[in-house]
């Protein structure tokens, strides 16, 4: 080890000595940043899949709100209901038909991959099939959320995403008597 390397060992510590011995200059701040990046990668790892997720019976509770959010590891779509509901079916597909006309909504939906979201419940939304119901500008994964309409005890949406990425779906209760069906789509595989 050269005199410069020995000085680095004394000044910075053993982790920098290993970096200097392979010809890379490291600082304590860079070491901390590398540890933080590794922790983030572990925190964002998911065991989610890309296959269909479906569960629950039909419900009389109606979806009345759709909203989106961003997380460090995924983008989220929340469907809120005016009562208890648990029924849904979510899958990747190349075609999502509007409930009223049968028109394929995929050509009108931004994204490179498309999730058909079928909620086993009616809708109280004042949207028309084909309406874009969320602003997902600058989201990492979500590209669009389009209302597909409703039939008896079934409301359909198409969610456009940037790629066929892992997702999960689950239900939450509250606030009050309301319930929510939540769709998370990961930022990476």
Image (spheres, rainbow, N blue to C red):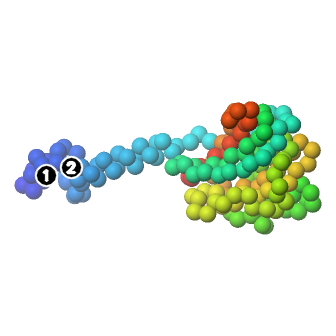
Q: Is residue 5 above or below residue 42?
A: below
| 136 or 159, nearer to the observer | 136
Q: Position of residue 173 (x, y in %)?
A: 69, 33
3D distance between C-alphas at marks 2 and 1: 7 Å
| 130 or 104, nearer to the observer | 130
Question: In this figure, which residue is indicated by the disc labeled 1?
Answer: 8
Q: Residues within 10 Å of mark 1 (few under 14, many from 20)?
A: some
Furthest-front residue in view?
176
Question: In this figure, which residue is indicated by the disc labeled 2?
Answer: 16
Q: Residues within 10 Å of mark 2 (few under 14, many from 20)?
A: many
- The residue at the point 61 percent across, 51 percent down is 69
Q: Secondary structure at mark 1?
A: helix
Furthest-bottom residue in view?
107
Q: Is residue 100 shown left or right of residue 141?
A: right
Assess whether mark 1 and mark 2 are in contact (beta carbons under 8 angstroms).
yes
Q: Is residue 91 shown left or right of residue 102?
A: left
- The residue at the point 75 percent across, 61 percent down is 132
Q: Position of residue 167 (x, y in %)?
A: 65, 46
Q: Is residue 186 shown left or right of residue 89?
A: left
- The residue at the point 93 percent across, 60 percent down is 101
The answer to which quarter of the image holds residue 46 is: top right
The answer to which quarter of the image holds residue 147 is: bottom right
Q: Secondary structure at mark 2?
A: helix
| 89 or 94, nearer to the observer | 89
- The residue at the point 70 percent across, 65 percent down is 110
Is residue 167 among what the camera can see?
no
Q: Which mark is residue 120?
A: none
Q: Earlier in the sequence, mark 2 or mark 1?
A: 1
């Amino acid at each position: 080890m050269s005199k410069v390397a020995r000085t680095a060992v004394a000044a910075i510590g053993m982790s920098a000595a290993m970096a200097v011995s392979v010809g890379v200059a490291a600082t304590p701040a860079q070491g901390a940043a590398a540890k933080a990046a590794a922790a983030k990668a572990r925190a964002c790892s998911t065991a989610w899949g890309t296959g269909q997720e479906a569960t629950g019976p039909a419900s009389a509770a109606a979806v009345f709100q759709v909203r989106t959010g961003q997380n460090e590891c995924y983008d989220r779509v929340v469907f809120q209901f005016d009562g208890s509901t648990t029924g849904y079916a979510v899958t990747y597909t190349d075609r999502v038909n509007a409930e009223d006309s049968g028109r394929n909504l995929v050509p009108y939906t931004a994204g490179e991959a498309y999730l058909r979201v079928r909620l086993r419940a009616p809708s109280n939304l004042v949207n028309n099939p084909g309406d874009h119901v969320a602003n997902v500008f600058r989201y990492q994964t979500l590209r669009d959320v389009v209302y597909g309409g409703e039939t008896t005890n079934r409301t359909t949406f198409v969610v456009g995403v940037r790629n066929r990425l892992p997702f999960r779906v689950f239900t939450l209760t509250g606030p009050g008597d309301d319930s929510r069906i939540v769709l998370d789509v990961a930022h990476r595989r």
